[in-house]
Image (cartoon, rainbow, N blue to C red):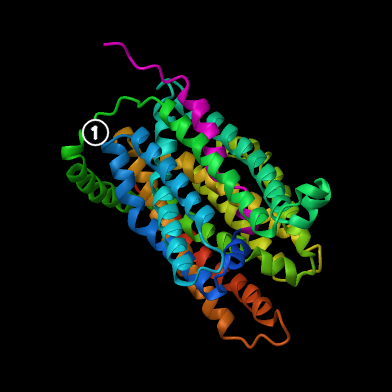
Amino acid sequence: MTAPDLSGNLRRFVLFTVFYNARAYYPVLAILFIDLGLTLDQFVLLNLIWAATIFLFEVPTGALADTLGRRRLLIFSASLMILEMLCLLLAPQGGGALLFGICVLNRMLSGMSEAMASGADEALAYDSLPEDGRVDAWDRTLATAMRWRSVGFVIAMVLGGLLYDPSLMNKLLPGNFQLPLAVAHRLPVAIVLCQGVTCLFLTLRMVEPPNPNAQGEGGSFRKAFSLTLQTGRWVFTNPHTLVIVLVGLALDSIVRNLATINSSYYRLIELPEWSFGFIGASIGLLGWFVPGIATRMNARFGTLTNLAFAAAGILLGLAAVSQTWPIFGLLPVMFLMATLGFLGFTVSRALHREADSSSRATVLSVKGLAFNLGYGLFSLGFSRLLASTVDHPEGTALRHALRWQVPVFAVVISLLFLWANFCWKRKV
């Protein structure tokens, strides 16, 4: 039997991760929903629904990817991406309960799509590499994907922000071709819809690598459930994977929380709102250089050492952020976002080396589940910290929370690394 030609999977994986992740509506996501007619409270509720959907589907879909096939899960993911964009394009402006219901459907489809893609894309690409020299080849592939994803984010951030502002667009158009406000607000969504169609085309062209776990639909769900329990038990009883996941989620959650509230922080340090999209583009451009640094650092130092470097960098960055320096407070945020990219590279590389091919996507999904749970719990604690302080004058509560998280993070991460150092030396 002729072996399948997997050579095109790597290029398609890189393109898929760019078009899937670099979405043109990201710089205007919150105001996109609010301008449709939702309240801020409803938007927060939608984010909770989105996170809960990912939490529920993350591991089961990873196990299905290892049994039903990674390519099939990616096709489903791209299809759901198209449907979620259609929901936003067709959502009625100020549609009351109908609008909210469509937006709930959008967030559920988005969460399911994220869960299906999580782990399946990397697992398919990793197993498409020749076994000889696979670790080094994966480093190069991951670095390439991260660099082009950074380019994609730069384009998406700038384009999405510019298209959403009809006043700027209308200055560039003839007088008889002025864009109405409602049309301009849907343009970033229309671009992401085209990205979803591109993702579907790419996944249909992918080739499934040989997988001894793969089964037909009849037994795949039973096998997926069994594989989920088996892999979850292995991840949290294997000392190395346990350290990688728990240390990784502790570092990831605090930086991701800052990324979520970055617009409030930018306003606090007196940056104009028109600059937010360009700031996001600059951070994306900075991400072009992170993979090269991460590759050299991971080749020279062990996983635990690189996690310690990331922890030290995050602690320094958070301490600088807590000073809320006007304008110049942007610099530590950019450093923290770069460190988050370094952390993602390190965790991905380490888990791929530990995981067996037959359960690779499930392992990555267990990691994704743990990271999302950690992020959710940290966000909940941070919001309670904000609520405990009277926000007068405006910005006092955020300043208070940013300062308090520094000593708490320092204590938690110090204890975590003492434990991690003990676990790492245990034989697997």
Which residue is nearer to you in this view: 103 or 95?
95
> Is 204 above or below relative to 283?
above
The percent coordinates of residue 374 (x first, y second) are 45, 63
Q: Which residue is mark 1?
A: 213
Check the image and report above or below for 28 versus 409: above
Q: Please say whether residue 175 is one of the residues in the magenta stretch.
A: no
231 relative position to 46: left or right? left
Could you tell me how many numbered marks the image carries?
Answer: 1
Image position of 38 with respect to 103: above or below: below
Quarter of the image that includes the C terminus: top left
Numbered disc 1: secondary structure: loop
Q: Is residue 10 magenta?
A: yes
Q: Which residue sits at x=45%, y=59%?
A: 107
Residue 237 is left or right of residue 157, and the answer is left
Residue 14: x and y, percent? 54, 32
Q: Which residues are magenta?
A: 1-28
Q: Residues within 10 Å of mark 1 (few under 14, many from 20)?
A: some
